[in-house]
Structures are given as C-alpha cells and as structure tokens.
C-alpha cells in the first residue's frame, strides 16, 4: 500500500484510503444520483435503520430472548459493529469478532447522537479514523489516539478505551447474541435516562477488508441485500 501522508479525506488524494472507499462506491454507483434530502429531525437516520433492521422495544424482551443461545445465530466471518449512545450525548463505536465475545475495539466518537442520526439520513456515511502514531509496534486497532472524520469533515480526536465504561458494558451485555438491529435500550439507571434521554443503538454485520498492516475497512451488510443506508468505517495509520 502507498504511504499515507495526510488526512484521509484531504482532497481525496490519499490513494490508500481512496482505494478502500472505491470498494464500496463502485458496487452501487446509482447512489451518486440520489436526490438531496434534508432531515426534518435528528432521528431521521435512526428511523431509516428501524425500517431496515428488526426493531426492539425499550423493554428489550426480544434482546433477552436472543441473548440466551450460546452459539452464534449466523455462522460466518462477518464482523459485528455497534454504534450507540444517549440522545443527548455522544455515540460510541464497538467492534466485535462475534456478538458473544468482548469487543476488540471500543471508542467514544467526538459526535453527538443527533448529528450522527442526521448523517445516517443522508444514506451514505463514511467514518474514517486516522492514527498518527509513527511507530508500528502495535496492530492497527491497538492504537490509542485517533483523528476522526465523518463524510470528509474532521470532527475531532478520540482515544480508544482500555476498559469499557459501565454504560458500554451494559449495552454489550444487553445485546449479547444479537447479530443486527436498531432501537432503544433501557437505561442502566432512571437518573441517566432523565438527564441524557433514550439510549439508542444500531448494530449491523460488516465485511472486514484488511488492505495492509496500516489500513482496514468495514462495510455494512444490509439484511438480505435490501436497499438501505451505506455505512463504511475506515482505519488508517499514517507513515
């Protein structure tokens, strides 16, 4: 792979990241001709996911049922990605090799939930995380400090979690065994619910593509090939 010398969306001249992005865009060129639509509310993106995925009630009876099997319901090599957060707070990203396993990567993104939902309403969301670490002693997803971009705009910096917070553990345990879905989860405490609003989540399966030791990408798999929002996540380490 060619070296990464700049931020991943600067003029789209970064060939390493562009080759990853092109992997997703060439499969559906018609999306470039979609009409521009403005979201009437911050929950527009989440409502689209409600239509695409099985929606679970706030009581999470279905989550509890799906969480009981000890063996995965879908036996394949797809990676599980979960984006979740309180409506009045920031969203977090968790990546798991299997819904029953602990995440291999957890990070709180510098994006509020309402901003992320608006981006989801645009049908195409590309999140890029760029590590500026110069040494390559760690695996890519073991890096700690990341610059975060969403649809070409730099939104800030984040630090990968060494240990999950209580809220993050609550989400992972509640969704244990759930392969895909979107909805609202019960808050661990009524106090947090009153202060931060509902705890929303989107969980999907992703194709994981390893470009090199310094670049990986995740492409969301829509259920049964159904048309829906395109969500791609890119990891790049600068040289």
Image (cartoon, rainbow, N blue to C red):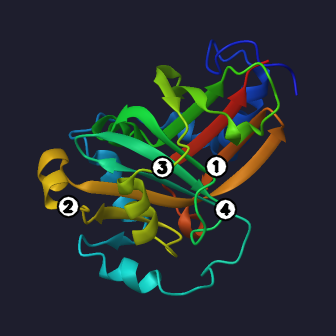
Q: Give the numbered dot on residue 97.
A: 4
Write down the residue under mark 2. 189
Distance from disc 1 to disc 4, alpha carbons, whole Å, reads 14 Å
Disc 4 crowd rating (10 Å Cα; few below 14, some 14-19, many 20+) is some
Q: SS of the residue at dot 1?
A: strand
* Sequence-first tag of 3 and 1: 1
- Quarter of the image with the N terminus is top right
Q: SS of the residue at dot 3?
A: loop
User: Does 230 sit above or below residue 68?
Assistant: above
* Sequence-first tag of 2 and 3: 2
Which marked residue is nearer to the observer: mark 1 or mark 4? 4
* Sequence-first tag of 3 and 4: 4
Identify the residue at image location x=35%, y=55%: 167
Write down the residue under mark 3. 229
**Is residue 47 left or right of 197 when viewed as pictured?**
right
User: Does 149 sit above or below residue 75?
Assistant: above
Which marked residue is nearer to the observer: mark 3 or mark 4? 4
Write down the residue under mark 1. 219
Is residue 67 something one can see in this rendering?
Answer: yes
Distance from disc 3 to disc 4, alpha carbons, whole Å, reads 22 Å
User: Does 114 sit above or below residue 69?
Assistant: above
Which marked residue is nearer to the observer: mark 3 or mark 1? 1
User: Does 105 sit above or below residue 224?
Assistant: above
- Mark 1–mark 4 contact, CB under 8 Å? no
Disc 3 crowd rating (10 Å Cα; few below 14, some 14-19, many 20+) is many
Distance from disc 2 to disc 3, alpha carbons, whole Å, reads 32 Å
Percent x, y of residue 237: 73, 27
Disc 1 crowd rating (10 Å Cα; few below 14, some 14-19, many 20+) is many
Q: SS of the residue at dot 2?
A: loop
Identify the residue at image location x=45%, y=82%: 66
Percent x, y of residue 16: 78, 26
């Amino acid at each position: 792979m060619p070296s990464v010398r700049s931020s991943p969306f600067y003029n789209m001249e970064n060939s390493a990241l562009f080759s990853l992005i092109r992997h997703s865009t060439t499969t559906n060129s018609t999306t470039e001709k979609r009409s521009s639509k403005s979201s009437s509310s911050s929950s527009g993106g989440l409502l689209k996911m409600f239509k695409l995925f099985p929606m679970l009630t706030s009581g999470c009876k279905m989550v509890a049922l799906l969480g009981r099997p000890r063996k995965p319901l879908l036996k394949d090599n797809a990676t599980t990605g979960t984006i979740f957060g309180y409506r009045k707070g920031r969203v977090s990203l968790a990546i798991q090799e299997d819904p029953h396993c602990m995440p291999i990567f957890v990070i709180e993104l510098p994006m509020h939930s309402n901003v992320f939902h608006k981006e989801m309403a645009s049908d195409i969301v590309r999140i890029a995380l760029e590590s500026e670490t110069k040494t390559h002693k760690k695996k890519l997803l073991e890096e700690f400090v990341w610059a975060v971009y969403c649809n070409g705009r730099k939104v800030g910096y984040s630090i990968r979690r060494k240990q999950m917070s209580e809220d993050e553990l609550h989400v992972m345990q509640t969704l244990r065994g759930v392969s895909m879905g979107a909805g609202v989860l019960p808050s661990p405490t009524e106090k947090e619910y009153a202060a931060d609003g509902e705890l929303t989540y989107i969980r999907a399966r992703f194709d994981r593509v390893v470009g090199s030791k310094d670049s990986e990408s995740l492409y969301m798999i829509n259920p049964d090939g159904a048309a829906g929002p395109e969500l791609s996540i890119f990891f790049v380490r600068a040289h």
